[in-house]
Image (cartoon, rainbow, N blue to C red):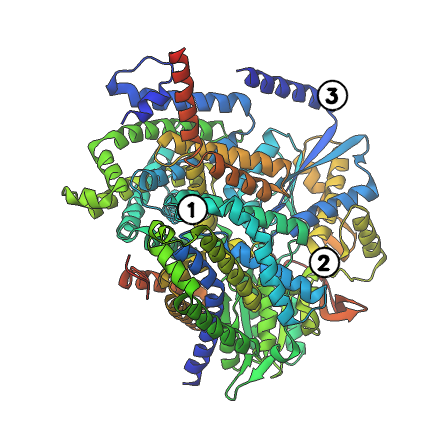
Amino acid sequence: MITILSIAIDALAFGMVLFIISIGLSVMMGLARVVNLAHGAFAMIGGYIASYMLREAGAGFALSTLVAVLGTIAILMPLEFLLYRRLYRNADAFRQILMTIGLTFFIIGITNTVFGPTSKPIPLPEALSGPLDIGFRMVPAHYVLVIACGAITALGLWFLLDKTQFGTRIRATVDNAAMAESLGIRTEILYAATFALAVGLAAFGGVLGAQLLPIEPYYALRYMVIFLVVVSVGGAGSILGALAASLVLGLASTAGKYMAPEFGDFFFYLTVILVVFIFPHGLLGARK
Amino acid sequence: MHSLGRILGALVASAVVSVAHADTIKVGVIGPMSGPYALFGQNFKWGIDAWVAENGDTVGDHKVEFIFRDEESPDPAKSKALAQELIVKDRVQYLAGTYFTPNAMAAAPLLAQGKVPLVVMNAATSSIVEKSPYIVRTSFTMWQNTVPAAKVAKDMGSDKVAIAVSDYGPGHDARDAFKATFEEMGGEVVEEVNMPLSTTDFGPIMQRIKDSGADTIFTFLPSGPPTLAFVKAYIDNGLKADGIKLLSTGDVVTEPDLPAIGEAGLGILSTYHYAVSHDSPENAAFLEAMKTVGAKPGEVTMTAVAAYDGARLIYEMIEATDGKQDPDTAIEAVKGMSWASPRGPVSIDPQTRHIKQNVYLREVAKEGDTFINKETQTFEAQPDWGLAE
Amino acid sequence: MTAIGTTTAAGAPRLPGWVRYEVTAFAVVTALGLIGYLVFPFDLALLTRIIAVTFLVLSLDLVTGYAGVVTLGQAAIFGVAAYAVGNACLAGITDPVMLLGVGIIAGALMGLVSGVLISRFSALPQLVISIAFGQLVAALANKLAQFTGGSDGLAGFAPSAVLGVFEFDIFGRTSFGFSLVVLAVVLALLLRFVQSPFGLMCRGIRDDALRARMIGTAVYPRLIVMYGVSGAVAGVGGALSAINVGVVSLHSVSFEMSAEALVMLVVGGAGHLLGAVFGSILFQIFGHFVGSTNPFHWMTIVGGTLILITLFAPKGLYSAFASAMAKFRKSRVSQ
């Protein structure tokens, strides 16, 4: 029983990390309709900025995270004008894949040259590092941070997209861009805002997830597949779906690792196949 | 057509040039110059450059030229093509490098055909040297470094060990070596975990180890981001606080990774054939030479030493053959050769053509502001235990 | 329908239909082979490897370019065929032509399995199933070390001489020649195949699956058959890779391999067999030269180049080239 509970805790933490990192991609794929393979590269940029702030500039954790989010948005907004604007709602999946893979390579190459190939740690404040005794076992203290931030992110996004005017406009644009435009919604600005939101979430996830997915130049490629799988299993654009997918896949991965680690990612991907067969439109995705 | 003519012209011109320098002996070095393992390919280059900086680029009246090629990842098809190109196009007399085992294996059948010796500077699976009589290795094998680790565990008073290794060739070698040695000495292995190479979330694995009731963990992971996550998980899941000891091969605590592991890593024990902090005049000179060729102090790894010593072997072979392409004489010349390496006294085992060397027990410590692997015990002249039986 | 016929016959008189594809295939392959042999006489190993991967890209073109199935799991077929050939060779079947047959059968079977799983879905779920399928096969390949050699790779097998005459040599001449001939034959067959009623129907499915269904086409079974053919082609590539290299590693079933093949296809131009061939050759030669002249920055350079291609040749280089040629010819006609 304790073992099951123990696996559940690890699974919850890993699932939350998956959620925080993947939700930005879900926003991008669901709202801007871009299969953004460079999402991991965006998260990585956030991680590098946070690592620099913490280790070189001596800033606190909260401030570093904020700077990482805003800094990543600032660095990547020019790409919105130059590249991504051409991709929104563009039905040509090939073009999206090629451009975003190219961008990923480019960012990895630059990162490798500037920061070197070794991984960059993101040290946590004293209270959140080391083990935490929760009675029947010790867990890493950063689990608390990750789970709390995951819950807040999910709630915040739900509020933003379902309860604010911004959200209403975005949903209107996703459903019918031409109609939205004729109603006076400036879709261009809306897309730019969506891009910024997705990038900011990526950076946030990169920083918070760094304890389980360490920041290094090949981060962008190493986890690309996992992010894509989480979003697709959950249904692009669905916050609850992404949360459910993260938790289910987090559980599959954690339980697999505990019970039969030598099978590697076998159980993770087996679960993916099963879920897609049973829910081809995503766990909670909209039928479109 | 015009450009084709130009290319052909350039080819002819380059052929003429290579005739003019007929007495340049070329050495092809295959290493990961790009990709996640680029640091180690870079170290190949630094190590060789350091040797050349100290000893000049001529042997007798033969000029030696090193040509570098990028193997990037374990991709034998690509490596074989590179080796073939180096042999037939660049007409190299020696091959060197190979970070990954499958890549070394792919090159092995070419050596006899091309009459080219290969100096393996990393690939650490024991059986590689058996694939061709023209292979000699200056790096290490997992067996070589792991057998002393099992002895250390016994000496520390460990009874129940959990083995956690990366699930690939070298990991399996480390697991088998530790298990065989430790059980022979009467110890018990209570848990064996083969961890997928892609793992960075080690929470469940730590839980499993904890459930096994082990008092010591022996681990091997290839140097890189996962090692950091493994050490963190060991601490954060309370295994360190519970007094479970962590023992590893040096790959888990290579010097470039130490700053990232930070204070938390202090006290981690490992057995390995080279520590950057090794205290000897040879090592001091080596590190000095590394600096002059542009190596950053924080990025020196064991592959640089293997390359440095590998270059020494190549110079020796060129001298023995007087620059002629004669792989039998060349290999014969280095069998049994011994010298003082930056890592300590070493020799080439005449039977296996693998390097015999000291293996050290080290402890992660802090010296001033830098983290080092402090050597605390020496296991002298270790052979490759994987081939010794 | 005539896109391939007209563009490749550029300048040449129109050939009678019954040999057009064969002539095209042999002309293209011979020209490429000659250029390769003359310009890179010492790089035959590289060229041979490029040809093996070209089969993977061609096979991907069949399902992706001609039938609209976007997959990132095609290397699973290529790799399993390569492992099958390696094992067959270890078991005593050393004749290269027989081994090719083993590769084709293994590839076709894997293709059918992939088809059953992947082409059941469309859009994002399809992409994800393809990834998951590829990763499952990769995880199994690592686990089943007795058949695959695990991470050390499957090695120690040596095919005998081609037709009992041509021994595999260190210069790679036999490998190169053998691979070229196989490429010519397969390309000729495929050029004919994609113009067949079945091939045209697949294109109809790609363009509008719903309409195809409306006119009574059984979409799913057709896609599975297409996958079988595609698998056989990928199997040829895997077999050639195993025969020429003598080692099969996990790289051949990896996600990277699938992703690279897709990039090559899109660079060349999906939906054109010759586009697949050119994309594969150009990307790999470009990668080789950037990699050997500047290994430390090749990712930056390749990445930047890919972005430029999507900006200036969004339909792939082959289409860009073909439309440039068409414009050129039109301007000559109008003069």
Residue at point 77%, 36% (across, down): B319
Q: Position of residue B235 (x, y in %)?
A: 61, 76
Does residue B235 appear to the left or right of C131 in the view shown?
A: right
Residue at point 68%, 67% (across, down): A54
Does residue B60 appear to the left or right of C268 in the view shown?
A: right
Mark 3 lies on residue? B20
Q: Looking at the rendering, in which quadrant would you find the N terminus of chain C?
A: top left
Answer whether residue B78 is visible to the viewer in this image. yes
Q: CA distance from mark 2 to mark 3?
A: 42 Å
Mark in front: 2 vs 3: 3
Q: Looking at the rendering, in which quadrant would you find the C terminus of chain C?
A: top left
Q: Chain of mark 2?
A: B
Q: CA distance from mark 1 to mark 3?
A: 45 Å
Which kind of residue does numbered mark 3 sit on? Ala
- Say if B169 sits above or below A283 in the image: above
Q: Position of residue B124 (x, y in %)?
A: 60, 54
Q: CA distance from mark 2 to mark 1?
A: 42 Å
Mark 2 lies on residue? B357
Mark 1 Cα-neighbour bin, 10 Å: few <14, some 14–19, many ≥20: many
Mark 3 Cα-neighbour bin, 10 Å: few <14, some 14–19, many ≥20: few
Describe the element under mark 2 as helix, strand or loop: strand
Mark 1 lies on residue? C258
Disc sitting over residue C267 in the figure:
none
Describe the element under mark 3 as helix, strand or loop: helix
Q: How many marks?
A: 3
